[in-house]
Amino acid sequence: MNKKKRSWKKGILGGIAIFLIAILLLLFVGVYFPNISFVGEIGTIVMSLFSLHLVILSVILGILAILMIRLKMKRLALVSGITAIVCTIGFAIPIAQMLQVANENDAKISWTKQLFSAPDMGGPDLSKSVKYATVDGNDLYMDISIPKNTKAKRTPIVLIHGGGFVAGTRNQSPSWTQFYVDRGYVVFDVDYRLAKDGYTTWDKAAPDVASAIVWIGQHADKYQVDMEQLLIAGGSAGGSLALQVGYGLNDGTLKPYISGKIYAPKAVVAVYPAQNMTNIWYEGTNFFGMDGEAFLGAYIGGSPKEKPEAYAAVDVVKHVGKTTPPTLLLVGKNDHLLPYSGQVAFEKLLNEKQVPNKFVAIPYNDHFFDMSGGSIGSQISYQVTGDFLDKYAK
């Protein structure tokens, strides 16, 4: 009976250990060799969202190794022990580097939030939805989130969702919405037209957002917002549109189709944005099958050689000048979809043009590093964003 029980324990323990070894080594390779197709993408996105969990799993494997020694499973115990030590140290190094960035930006990290973090996926909140335009047969809405404060004039922020210009929806990132609401801002989370077969939107999406801003200005009294304090923010494709709209309204090249006063933003917050579409087309990026060239093919309708005027319109690097508003860039160093080198080049351009800016790169983090509001990258981003807006949007 005891032998059967012992054998049963060995089988269960061994199975769990082998599973953990396989998973941890796969992720370890992905974290440190991000250019390996698929494996690198898995490693970096898991490290981005669940950093602490990887260390905990490594420690658990170490505990299993000790139990296996007691059950005389020496070979598997040795492999498990070595893997546990290597992975515990290996996964702690990226965390240490992320904490260094947090320390540099005075960001306090809550390990409870990190431990209980979950994917931050939202959708339209019909109780907050208001239609602001109908164009090409498309009804465009915005979700309006109002803080509890009773200030006579509050700061409006236009929040733009991502999705590669072909997908996504308003209120896609509830944690960001809540962050801005907690700061006392009125959040206008806007729809814009999405590209589809035979329907490009490079000349439609930004004017949609610009028109939404005109609409907000027309209803400023109703929502008690001060349009002179306008902010624009977004992530990924939404970050690109935040730059396009913010810069285009400031230099006068972007025209809304709703008649009314045009307001330029005081500052722009762009999270891993696409800024130089021309470079992205030629980079050949890929993230779990998501392809920068495919997105741009749908959004713009062709290559830079085929559509030079369109690329000139949406490449925000061509719209940086004296009127460019202060810009915050939050990026992941291991971004597979939008090359980190492009983000660095964009920051360099802003500095050359003497545009006030803040650039924060999260080490070992990929695209979507803020998909979980409790991730280390997200917590750093919230603190940095708050400090940036306190400096430039008061």
Image (cartoon, helix red, strand yellow):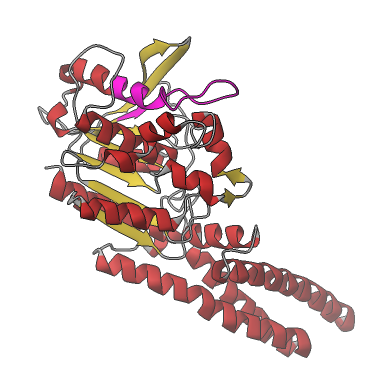
Q: Which one is in front, 77 or 304?
A: 304
Task: Look at the image and tell me whether residue 247 can be seen.
Answer: yes
- Tell me where residue 162 appears, x and y as whole percent: 45, 37
Residue lying at 48% horizontally and 51% vertically, measured from the top left: 367
Residue lying at 51% horizontally and 44% vertically, measured from the top left: 281
Tell me the quadrant of the picture where the C terminus can be found: top left
* Marker count (numbered): 0
Q: Is residue 23 above or below residue 149?
A: below
Q: Which one is in front, 123 or 127?
A: 123
Determine which quarter of the picture holds residue 275: top left
Q: Magenta segment: does it hold 198? A: yes
Determine which quarter of the picture holds residue 254: top left
- Tell me where residue 117 appears, x and y as whole percent: 47, 54
Magenta segment range? 188-212
Q: Which one is in front, 38 or 188?
A: 38
- Tell me where residue 72 appears, x and y as whole percent: 78, 90
Q: Is residue 319 left or right of residue 264?
A: right
Determine which quarter of the picture holds residue 310: top left
Tell me the quadrant of the picture where the N terminus can be found: bottom right
Q: Is residue 133 left or right of residue 43?
A: left
Q: Which one is in front, 284 or 8?
A: 284
- Tell me where residue 155 appears, x and y as whole percent: 18, 33
Q: Is residue 15 left or right of residue 4?
A: left
Residue lying at 26% horizontally and 17% vertically, measured from the top left: 215
Q: Magenta segment: does it hold 382? A: no
Residue lying at 24% horizontally and 46% vertically, measured from the top left: 327
Q: Is residue 11 above or below residue 127?
A: below
